[in-house]
């Protein structure tokens, strides 16, 4: 193992050296820019020294290609992270942790959008990525060619979320002071030639160059020839569908693979017709459209993106969760003793066997017995989807209902409730091992 | 921003038409004053306001744009340029895709070997890398574009319908990527498609393992079987095989790009008709 580690570190050290030099350059540019603007000389000096640290310490250490010298994530941190995410409660720690993080970022957004704070966070996350790359297990997953775009996606989303939030915070502060938002400030129009066409040209050239470098530096993946008898473990869908595949843990394919995706598309299309708030058209704001903002971010950042990240980086053989620094052991055993609601009701609650139609009985009799067996789940789902919307309309969403009218409100509340089914099902799975609320395998109808 | 300094460098002051006699013409001026150049470009070099307007109005490629835009609307920190980048990536995918089509044969006998030789043997095999990374990038930039459009509330009236068109374009982008995933015919390809298309087996009513599948029976005979359900319609077989490869190839190279092009045209046209690029209305 020791010899292998040496070979692995030697292979990765040139890349890491270049990586730290790039981080240094990034900080030098930032420092130089701050210096030039004469806005914050102290900060400029600080980032300059951070850059010096990268190029003067981390880069040469990484280039030494000696496993003892190459800077890596401390073993304690790796073990702790593996323990937290790789254990049987990994999904809980991951999801709840990220939710808490996102909520914290949102509540303290005025603090986090500040330039130095955001820049420090960027430095820290890039540093953590670099330090983790010396871990063979982490490297294998993060540097898998088809996973590289997702690493990029995480950083791009972080950057753009910061940018949008910074502008929204600025705009909201302006509105609170009674001033015009940034986007209204600038009334000037410019000619498309040259201002827009040259921006477009420069974008196209930069993008072409970027794609060429990417294409030459990183070979597109090509595995062994297709074989329908050799099933890889894990078998993963393309990365952008991994959120849906992750839903399969909690729902049957007809929900996770057909109904939910269709409703995501329909729900996205319905957004402009459900959002009746005339404010916030054409500029970044959070305060003026808090409900739609939070709903969208919950659906996009939390339910869609974090599930993709989970499915890509943490789901291993047998769809078990593994810590990012953990070896993907095919024989890792995870106890699955999930129980249906009907079993809870009849067996644990009533101390009876599940109702079962007498053998040889006709289709209709069987149907009645199934209804009897599953009545609690059916009632619960119906109540959730049919009774809850009117209840919401008369209580918390009263204003919404009055403004939106019956049809629009019903569509919106049902879409919201169906979206919330996923987190609800997750929590029920984690807390009481619930498998299905309605379980009718006879009709392939498990819910 | 110093337009004439940067963008108009080397051009004569008089709209580039009437090159002052006696002055030495630079090579650029000679080219721009040649009969061939003037026959191709219908207007003189756009160095003054009038010609800068005319060039956008009379040029086939530029007439997609309006003549002038809100300065704020094209600020990078506002638009992120992600819609434009997505369109450019679509063009990159089209060009590299057509070039790859000259080389690649969608049959069980050749598909994998053609990709293998693109990697190991063929000059310009990097086209495949460009195509694959461009496709990943396009999925990401579509998401970022929608993210920005949502966060700036740019789907609000009168732009509702263009958002709907955009959602369909998002779906087509994902389907383009999904159908292309199969074409290399390696383990990664068929198992990703197998996992993805297995979902269709559970389509309510129309999938043979979907709820309500028993409803479609005729005289006691199931109409929805593994040989007639939604998954079969997608794959053309009961498993991911050569028929699927051909089906996905045609979808990937012809059907979906055509639909996307059609919707792109509507998407761009509606931007103009709905009040121009994003910004306060």
Image (spheres, rainbow, N blue to C red):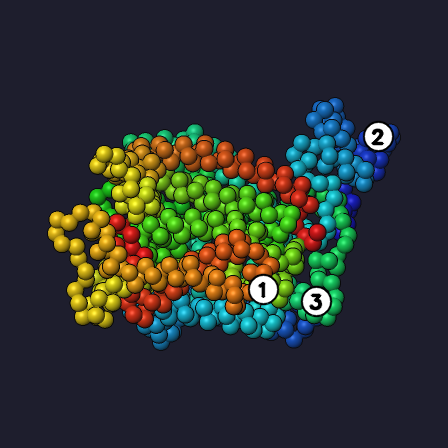
Q: Which residue is nearer to you in this view: A355 or A248?
A: A355
Relative to A201, residue A75 above or below: below
Label 3 sits on a secondary structure element that is: helix
The chain carrying label 2 is B
Label 1 sits on a secondary structure element that is: helix
Mark nearest the camera among 1 and 2 is 1
Question: At 67% from the left edge and 41% from the top edge, which residue is drawn?
Answer: B273
For the residues tagged 1 and 2, is the chain the same?
no
Dot 3 alpha-carbon crowd within 10 angstroms: few under 14, some 14 to 19, many 20 or more: some
The chain carrying label 1 is A
Residue A173, image x, y percentages: 68, 69
Residue B21 showing in the rendered view:
yes
Q: In which quarter of the image is residue A328?
A: bottom left
Label 2 sits on a secondary structure element that is: loop
How many numbered circles are shown?
3
Q: Mark 1 points at which residue?
A: A399
Q: Which residue is nearer to you in this view: A19 or B165?
A: B165
Mark 2 → mark 3, Cα distance in angstroms: 53 Å
Dot 1 alpha-carbon crowd within 10 angstroms: few under 14, some 14 to 19, many 20 or more: few
Q: In which quarter of the image is residue A70?
A: bottom left
Q: Mark 3 points at which residue?
A: A175
Residue A170, image x, y percentages: 66, 66
Question: At 70% from the left edge and 32% from the top edge, which residue is drawn?
Answer: B59
Dot 2 alpha-carbon crowd within 10 angstroms: few under 14, some 14 to 19, many 20 or more: few
Question: At 36% from the left edge and 33% from the top edge, which residue is drawn?
Answer: B247
Q: Residue B216 carries which label?
A: none
Question: At 78% from the left edge and 45% from the top edge, which residue is drawn?
Answer: B4
Relative to B216, residue A117 above or below: below
Mark 1 → mark 3, Cα distance in angstroms: 23 Å
Q: Which mark is residue B18?
A: 2
For the residues tagged 1 and 3, is the chain the same?
yes
């Amino acid at each position: 193992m020791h010899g292998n580690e040496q070979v692995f570190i030697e292979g990765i050290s040139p890349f890491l050296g270049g990586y730290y030099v790039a981080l240094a350059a990034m900080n030098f540019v930032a420092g130089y820019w701050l210096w030039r603007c004469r806005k914050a000389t102290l900060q400029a000096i600080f980032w300059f020294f951070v850059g010096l640290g990268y190029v003067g310490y981390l880069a040469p250490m990484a280039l030494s290609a000696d496993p003892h010298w190459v800077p890596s994530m401390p073993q304690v941190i790796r073990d702790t992270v593996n323990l937290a995410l790789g254990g049987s409660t990994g999904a809980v720690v991951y999801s709840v942790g990220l939710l808490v993080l996102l909520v914290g970022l949102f509540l303290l957004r005025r603090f986090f959008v500040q330039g130095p704070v955001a820049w420090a966070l960027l430095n820290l996350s890039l540093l953590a990525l670099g330090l983790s790359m010396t871990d063979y297990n982490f490297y294998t997953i993060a540097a898998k060619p088809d996973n590289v775009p997702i690493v990029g996606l995480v950083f791009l989303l972080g950057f753009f979320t910061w940018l949008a939030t910074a502008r929204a915070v600025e705009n909201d502060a302006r509105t609170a002071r009674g001033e015009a938002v940034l986007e209204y400030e600038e009334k000037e129009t410019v000619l498309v030639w040259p201002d827009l066409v040259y921006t477009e040209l420069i974008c196209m050239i930069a993008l072409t160059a970027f794609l060429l470098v990417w294409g030459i530096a990183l070979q597109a993946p090509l595995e062994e020839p297709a074989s329908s008898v050799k099933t890889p473990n894990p078998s993963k869908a393309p990365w952008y569908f991994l959120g849906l595949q992750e839903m399969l843990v909690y729902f049957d394919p007809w929900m996770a693979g057909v109904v939910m995706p269709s409703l995501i598309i329909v729900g996205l299309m319905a957004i402009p017709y459900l959002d009746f708030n005339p404010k916030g058209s054409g500029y970044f704001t959070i305060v003026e459209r808090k409900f739609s903002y939070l709903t969208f971010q919950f659906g996009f950042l939390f339910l869609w993106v974090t599930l993709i990240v989970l499915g890509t980086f943490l789901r291993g053989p047998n769809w078990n969760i593994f810590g990012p620094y953990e070896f993907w052991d095919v024989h890792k055993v995870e106890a699955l003793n999930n129980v249906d609601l009907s079993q809870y009701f009849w067996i644990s609650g009533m101390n009876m066997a599940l109702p079962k139609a007498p053998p040889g009985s006709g289709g209709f009799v069987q149907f009645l017995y199934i209804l009897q067996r599953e009545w609690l789940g059916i009632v619960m789902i119906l109540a959730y989807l049919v009774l809850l919307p009117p209840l919401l309309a008369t209580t918390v969403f009263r204003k919404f209902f009055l403004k939106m009218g019956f049809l629009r409100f019903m569509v919106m509340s049902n879409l919201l409730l169906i979206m919330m089914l996923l987190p609800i099902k997750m929590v029920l799975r984690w807390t009481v091992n619930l498998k299905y609320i309605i379980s009718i395998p006879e009709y392939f109808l498990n819910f | 921003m110093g337009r004439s300094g940067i963008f108009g460098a080397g051009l004569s002051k008089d709209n580039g038409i009437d090159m002052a006699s006696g002055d030495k013409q630079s090579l650029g001026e000679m080219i721009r004053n040649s009969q061939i150049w003037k026959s191709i470009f219908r207007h003189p070099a756009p160095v003054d306001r009038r010609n800068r307007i005319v060039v956008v109005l009379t040029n086939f490629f530029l007439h997609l744009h309006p003549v002038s835009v809100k300065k704020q609307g094209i600020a990078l920190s506002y638009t992120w340029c992600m819609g434009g980048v997505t369109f450019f990536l679509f063009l990159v995918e089209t060009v590299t895709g057509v070039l790859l089509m000259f080389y690649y044969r969608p049959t069980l006998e050749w598909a994998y070997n053609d990709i293998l030789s693109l990697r190991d043997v063929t000059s310009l095999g990097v086209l495949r890398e460009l195509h694959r990374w461009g496709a990943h990038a396009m999925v990401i930039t579509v998401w970022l574009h929608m993210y920005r459009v949502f966060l700036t509330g740019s789907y609000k009236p009168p732009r509702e319908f263009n958002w709907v068109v955009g959602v369909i374009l998002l779906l087509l982008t994902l389907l383009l990527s999904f159908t292309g995933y199969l074409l290399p015919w390696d383990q990664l390809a068929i198992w990703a498609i197998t996992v993805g298309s297995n979902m269709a087996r559970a389509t309510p009513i129309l999938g043979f393992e979907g709820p309500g599948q028993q409803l479609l029976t005729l005289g006691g005979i199931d109409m929805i079987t593994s040989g007639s359900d939604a998954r079969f319609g997608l794959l053309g077989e009961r498993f991911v095989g050569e028929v699927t490869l051909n089906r996905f190839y045609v979808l990937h190279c012809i059907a979906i790009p055509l639909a996307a092009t059609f919707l792109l045209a509507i998407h761009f046209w509606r931007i103009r008709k709905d009040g121009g690029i994003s910004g306060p209305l």
